[in-house]
Amino acid sequence: MYQIRLDDLNRRSLLRKLRIIDSATGPEVRMDGRMILLLSSNNYLGLATHPKVVEAAAQALRRYGVGAGASRVTAGTLRPHAELEARLAAFKHTESALVFSTGYHANLGLIQTLAEDKRVIYTDRLCHASLIDACRLSKATLRVFRHRDAAQLASLLARKQPPAPALIVTDGVFSMDGDLAPLPELVKIAEQTGSTVVVDDAHGTGVMGPEGRGTAEHFGLTGGSLVQMGTLSKALGGFGGFVVGPRTLIDYLVNRARSFLYTTALPPAIAAAAVAALDVVESEPERRETLWQLTRRLQNGAHSLGYDTLGSQSPIVPILIGDAGKALKMGARLLEHGIYAPAIRPPTVPEGTSRLRMSVTAAHTPQQIDDVLGVLEKLRAEVRAEKA
Ligand SMILES: *Cc1c(COP(=O)(O)O)cnc(C)c1O
C-alpha cells in the first residue's frame, strides 16, 4: 500500500529522499563521495562548527554527560539550562526565557498555552508548519489571512464589534520565502484589539536587527503585546527552541506547556553550546556583516539574471520555478554543477510555487556566490525554455 503511494508521489515529482552528508555542515560538504557547495543550511553564521561553540559543548559534555536524564520539571534542569535562559532573556531584552527541546516543541507549548484565553487564532497563510500544527492542537478556532496582509487581518478582526482579543501568529522571517512579516502593523492591530502577536523568529534570531536580536529589533519593536519564539538550531548553530517574554508568562509555561513538561530536557552540552554561540553573536558582529554582504550579492545577481526571488529580504533567497517537476529538474542540474539547493515543493509551499531555496551563510565566500550565479546564468536558458 505504501509503495503505491510512494510511486504516486514520485510520479507527481513530490517524492522526498534523504541525502547523506559525510562531513561537518560547513559551506562545503562531502556528499556521495564528492565535495558539494551547500546552499541550503540554516547555519547562517557558521556557528555549528565555530571552535568556541564546539569547545563549550565538549567541556559541558565531559562535565555533565550526554543526556539530561529527565524532563525539566523532574530532574532535568541543569545549570547550563538556567545559564542559557538568563542569557537568552538578556539577549532579547525580555524579563525571562524558557528553553524547549526544539523550536517545534516551543511553538506547540506556547500556542497551546496562549490559546487557553485567546480562543481565535489568526495566522499568516505561509506560517511554518510547526505553527499550523500548534494551532490545530490547541483546538482554538483557526482563521487564515493573506500573506503579509495586515489590512485583511484588521478587517477580519473588525467583523466582531467590539473585536474579541485574539492570537495573531506569524513567522518573523518566512522560512520558504525569506520575506518579513509586517510586524509593526500586526502589533498595532494587536494593541487596538487587546490581542497578542506571536512571532516565530527561527530565521530572525542572530540574523535580523543591528545586533542580531531578531525581527523585533529590526523593526525597533518592544512591548507587551508581542511574544517571541526562536530556535537555537539555525543561526546559533546548535539545537533546541525557546520562548522569551514576561516572567509570569514563562512561569506559567513551565506549569502548563505539555511539550515542555512531557519530554526530556535538551542535552546540557547543547545548552552550553548555545551560550557560547550567543557570546560569538555579540563579540563577532563581522559575521553578520559578511552574511548580509553575501546575501545582497546573491539577491542582486539573481535579479539581474531575471530570476524572481519572491521579495526575499533575508539570507533565504528563493528562486521561483513554479512547477514541481521543473523545480526538481533544476535542483538536479544544480547538483550536477556541485551545488546543493534542493527543490522545495508542495505541501511545503503552495501549488505552483515550487522553487529552489538558497540560503547564504557567513561561511561562504564571495567567489562561491559568484560561482552559484555563474551556474544560474547557464541554467537560465533552460528555465526560460521550461517555462514556455
Ligand atoms: C525550523 C523552524 C522551526 C522549528 O525549529 P526546530 O528547532 O528545527 O524544531 C519553527 N519555525 C520556523 C519558522 C522554522 O523555520
Image (spheres, rainbow, N blue to C red):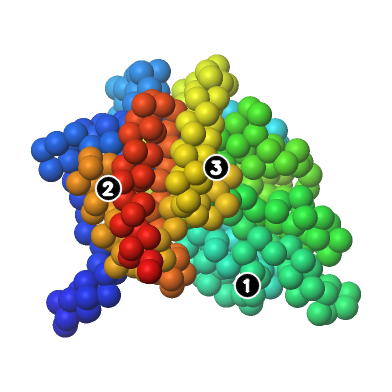
Query: With 230 as the anchor, is 56 left or right in this view?
Result: left
Judge whether 198 appears above or below 27 on screen. below
- Disc 3: which residue: 314
In the image, which is nearer the foreground, mark 1 or mark 2? 2
Q: Quadrant of residue 24?
A: top left
In x, y percent, where is residue 194? 82, 62
**Where does the C terminus fall, quadrant-wise?**
bottom left
Label 2 environment density (alpha carbons within 10 Å; few <14, some 14–19, many ≥20): many
Closer to the chain start, of discs 1 and 2, is 1
Q: Residue at x 15, y 77 (%)?
A: 3
What amino acid is at disc 1?
Val
In the image, which is nearer the foreground, mark 1 or mark 3? 3
In x, y percent, where is residue 262? 44, 56
Q: Observer-nearest residue: 377 or 313? A: 377
- Asked whether residue 290 appears in the rendered view, the answer is yes
Q: Quadrant of residue 214?
A: top right
- Asked whether residue 202 appears in the rendered view, the answer is no
- Disc 1: which residue: 144
Q: Residue at x 35, y 45 (%)?
A: 376
Q: Observer-nearest residue: 325 or 269? A: 325
Q: CA distance from mark 1 to mark 2?
A: 35 Å
- Disc 2: which residue: 334
